[in-house]
Image: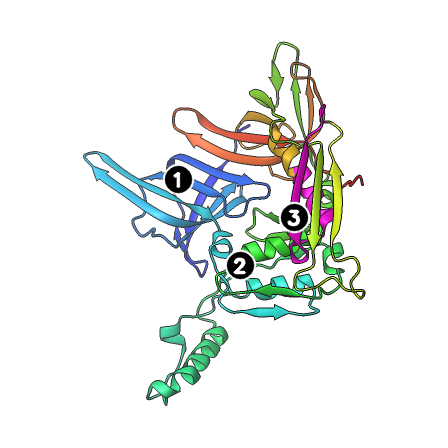
Amino acid sequence: MLQDVKIIVTDQTGKVISEENQFSAYSFDTQYGVVADAFNLTLVNFNSDIEPGHNIDFLIDGTVAFRGVILLRDSLVGKGEARLSLSGKDRATMLVENYCSVHKDYANETPKNIIDELIGQTNFYTKVKGTADTAADTTGFNNSTDMSDRNAALLADVNASETASGRDDTTTYDSEFTALSAKAKFKIEPGDRVFERIDSLVRSVGFEILYQENGALYIGDLTNKRYADKVIYKVTVDKKGNSTDVETANLIDDISGRYSTISVTSQAEGYRYTSSFPHVNREKIATDSTMRYKKYYSAHINDDEGSPENVAIRIREDQRNEGYQYYCEAAGHRAGNGEIWKINRYVNVYDEFNRVYEHLVLYGRTFVYSNETGSGTLLRMGKERINELVI
């Protein structure tokens, strides 16, 4: 199915730097559970104003399918040839690559409020309204002792200025996540990665993070979001290996990294066993009934890493998903139903050759193009995660 692909380069304020970009190759990758996915792009007849730090918007028929930040610029000019190679990651790299700058103990704070404050330490969500050198009046700040006052006034003037407008994204939380009660404690220290602490907090209460095509985060129950989306793709393969909606289908089923029994024990950090805390040490077990022989796995965590129930389930599901992979290659960037391929959606697979007859989840999607092969989409599917614990 034909589609119109457009690549736009903007600066941090949203100003368009280069709009009519001709390309000879690209790869835009998006994976479930991975934030800061990579992209590679080769432009021809390019605008030389493009620089590292600029933003990339990848659009299919006017719909944003990837937002990225250029981290590397490699230009080549020769006789009859001009080529610009760009690479980088999606916009979440501005969150993933940041470290916490302060020590703080959160007490009785909701997970949502903690996450909002952690993101606030970064410029993942930018709202640029002006520039420091033109928006602020620094009259009256004459020496180093005035620097803190000057900086505060400068920031206030920049925020109040309307000389430029920028992106104003927000994190989306599902209702179950925002309804969570406050956590008794949560700690960050200088040197902690901001996103790792956010991800640890989200997972500790049994939820997940999805980085969306529009450049924002979704935090909550991704299974519920999948059901609510109501978009189902389709893949059919007959006994001879002939397929519809995709060009190739490849099943890999590897049980070498899976265990039949996953035991997780936890110990509350900073507590000693007393009559007031008789259940400090806990153990929970998740079983994988599809394993054909006995294989035991053990892990130990502190309470601030999550409940042993959530961790046991997560380990089991990670093992299942890593071992069972269903790969497909599709022509173009739209499925047979006309929808653009997006992760965290269902794919109804009826594969007689590999004996797969079930809904799989689209966990990975890479848009690719080259002058030689044209446009296509690489798809990675797996079994749906199940939140079921057997004690």
Label 3 sits on residue? 300
Which residues fall within the magenta stretch? Answer: 291-317
Instruction: Give the label, 2 or 3, closer to the camera.
Output: 3
Q: CA distance from mark 1 to mark 2?
A: 28 Å
Amino acid type indicated by mark 2: Val
Regarding residue 221, the answer to whether it shows in the image is no
Judging depth in this view, the residue of 103 and 380 nearest the camera is 103
- Percent position of residue 73, x then y: 32, 47
Q: Earlier in the sequence, mark 1 or mark 3?
A: 1
Under mark 3, the amino acid is His
Q: In the image, what residue occupies the spot 18% across and 34% down?
A: 79
**Under tag 1, what secondary structure?**
strand
Residue 117 position (above or below residue 156): above
**Count of marks overlaid on the render:** 3
* Residue 306 counted in the magenta span: yes
Q: Nearer the viewer, residue 216 or 305?
A: 305
Q: Residue furthest front?
A: 274
Q: Which residue is mark 1?
A: 41
Q: CA distance from mark 2 to mark 3?
A: 23 Å
- Mark 2 residue element: helix
Give x and y (percent) for residue 212: 59, 47
Q: Closer to the observer: label 1 or label 3?
A: 3
* Residue neighbourhood size for the residue with mark 3, other residues' Cα within 10 Å, grouped as few (<14), some (14–19), many (≥20): some
Q: Which residue is mark 2?
A: 194
* Residue 171 in picture, x, y percent from top left: 62, 57
Q: Nearer the viewer, mark 1 or mark 2?
A: 2
